[in-house]
């Protein structure tokens, strides 16, 4: 076991973990962040995605020791207090979930896309979400939601945010 410090949703956390522990396990089991889901465990479905810096990455096989100083943003960290991120708001508005299992990865990927490309074409949205699987066939509503978010007149908040450390666990 090592003491490993990571920055999640703007707060610094030091955890005791074996260096090869997947980041997803630390987020869910140590920090209680259940936005990222365990799906395939093989970096194939996208359910576990988080933002690493501004990049959407699967967390299910990424060793926590390899995160380094890169800030992590989970689904919980997309909102600003009670104010939902435009992507979250759009998913609600478009009712873009059936079971909701894929929703975390879809929203994280969409947030990363819109950060880089605020007004993507339909093809660009499809390409960005290509590696996120939805078993329920909610794809059309998901694509619609991302389009809606891209049209939000308020624009998108910058990610990730960094605030003062909260202290050790
Ligand atoms: S659980 Fe990580 S990609 Fe499927
Ligand atoms: S809504 Fe069920 S997997 Fe996508």
Image: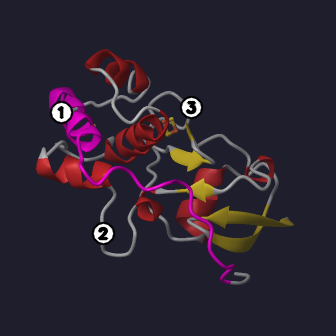
Mark 1 falls on what kind of element? helix
Along the line of sight, the residue nearer the viewer: 66 or 78: 78
Query: Is residue 13 one of those drawn in magenta?
Result: no
**Marks 1/3: CA distance?**
28 Å
Q: Is residue 34 above or below residue 118?
A: below
The dominant secondary structure in magenta is: loop
Mark 3 falls on what kind of element? loop
Along the line of sight, the residue nearer the viewer: 45 or 50: 50
Q: Position of residue 148 (x, y in %)?
A: 20, 40
Residue 144's disc number? 1
Along the line of sight, the residue nearer the viewer: 44 or 104: 104
Instruction: Identify residue for label 3.
Output: 42
- CB at mark 3 closer than 8 A to ligand 1? yes
**Span highlighted in magenta in the image:** 137-166
For the point 54% across and 56% down, which residue is it?
A: 73
Q: Position of residue 60 (x, y in %)?
A: 58, 43
**Of the image marks 1 and 2, the number of the one nearer the N terminus:** 2
**Marks 2/3: CA distance?**
33 Å
Q: Residue furthest left?
A: 94
- CB at mark 1 closer than 8 A to ligand 2? no
Front label number (2 vs 3) = 2
Q: Position of residue 15 (x, y in %)?
A: 74, 71
Instruction: Identify residue for label 2.
Output: 83
For the point 56% across and 56% down, which residue is it?
A: 160
């Amino acid at each position: 076991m090592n003491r490993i410090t990571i920055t999640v949703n703007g707060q610094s956390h030091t955890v005791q973990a074996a260096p090869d522990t997947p980041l997803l396990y630390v987020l869910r089991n140590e920090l209680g962040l259940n936005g990222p889901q365990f799906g395939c465990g093989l970096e194939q479905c996208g359910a576990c995605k988080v933002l690493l810096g501004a990049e959407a990455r699967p967390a299910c096989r990424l060793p926590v020791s390899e995160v380094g100083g890169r800030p992590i943003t989970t689904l919980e960290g997309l909102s600003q207090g009670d104010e939902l991120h435009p992507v979250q708001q759009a998913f609600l508005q478009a009712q873009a979930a059936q079971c909701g299992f894929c929703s975390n990865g879809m929203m994280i990927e969409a947030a990363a896309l819109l950060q880089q490309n605020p007004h993507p074409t339909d093809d660009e949205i499809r390409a960005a979400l290509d590696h996120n699987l939805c078993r329920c066939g909610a794809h059309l509503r998901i694509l619609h939601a991302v389009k809606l978010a891209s049209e939000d007149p308020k624009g998108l908040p910058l990610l990730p945010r960094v605030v003062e450390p909260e202290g050790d666990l």
